Image: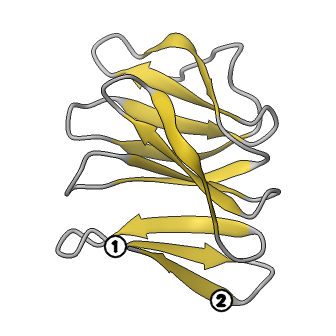
């Protein structure tokens, strides 16, 4: 099965939350699309994030969705209950790409491609 949708614009990252919703980053449009796993269709409007969303990870501790914004050197946080961005973007290193959440501590680890560093968000 292949899912197509007008909101997909240079999709980069994908993550699934415990409820089964699938989050896809759209690098070209600065958005995240949410896919309903029961129908394999995009639900609602894309979530506006930041410039160049790339990586995405779901916290097994809080359920929050973390998205790296490659072009703005930030991480945005999505509340999965409302599919809206919470708070201001978190500044990290240069050109963040990968993101992972420690299931024990809840800390978020971000790889910064151009900075050759790893940021830790507590």
Q: Position of residue 78 (x, y in %)?
A: 46, 39
Indicate the secondary structure of the residue bearing disc 1.
Answer: loop
Earlier residue among tags 2 and 1: 1
| Camera-nearest label, 2 or 1 | 1
| Placement of the C terminus among the 4 image quadrants | bottom left
The residue at the far bottom in this view is: 116
Residue 74, labelled with which disc?
none
Q: Residue at x 19, y 57 (%)?
A: 61
Numbered circles on residues, count: 2
Q: Position of residue 110 (x, y in %)?
A: 54, 73
Find disc 2 in the rendering and name its residue.
Answer: 117
Q: Few, some or many C-alpha atoms within 10 Å of disc 2 (few <14, some 14-19, many ≥20)?
A: some
Above-or-below relation of 114 to 16: below
Is residue 89 or residue 71 the one in the foreground?
A: 89
Indicate the secondary structure of the residue bearing disc 2.
Answer: strand
The residue at the far front in this view is: 87
Find disc 1 in the rendering and name its residue.
Answer: 107
58 on left or right of 113: left
Above-or-below relation of 20 to 67: above
Above-or-below relation of 60 to 6: below
Q: Residue at x 76, y 30 (%)?
A: 9
Q: Position of residue 57 (x, y in %)?
A: 42, 54
Q: Residue at x 65, y 38 (%)?
A: 49
Q: Position of residue 35 (x, y in %)?
A: 44, 22
Colouring scheme applied when the structure was drawn? secondary structure
Q: Few, some or many C-alpha atoms within 10 Å of disc 1 (few <14, some 14-19, many ≥20)?
A: some
Q: CA distance from mark 2 to mark 1?
A: 16 Å
Q: Residue at x 54, y 36 (%)?
A: 24
Residue contact between numbered discs 2 and 1, judged by CB atoms under 8 Å: no
23 on left or right of 89: left
76 on left or right of 12: left
Is residue 92 or residue 16 the one in the foreground?
A: 92
């Amino acid at each position: 099965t292949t899912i197509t949708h007008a909101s997909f614009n240079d999709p980069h990252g994908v993550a699934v939350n415990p409820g089964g919703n699938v989050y896809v980053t759209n690098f070209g449009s600065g958005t995240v699309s949410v896919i309903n796993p029961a129908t394999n269709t995009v639900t609602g409007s894309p979530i506006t994030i930041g410039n160049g969303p790339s990586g995405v990870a779901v916290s097994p501790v809080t359920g929050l969705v973390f998205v790296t914004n490659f072009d703005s050197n930030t991480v945005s946080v999505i509340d999965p209950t409302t599919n809206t961005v919470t708070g201001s973007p978190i500044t990290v290193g240069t050109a963040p790409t990968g993101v992972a959440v420690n299931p024990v501590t809840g800390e978020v680890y971000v790889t910064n491609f151009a900075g050759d560093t790893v940021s830790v968000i507590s």
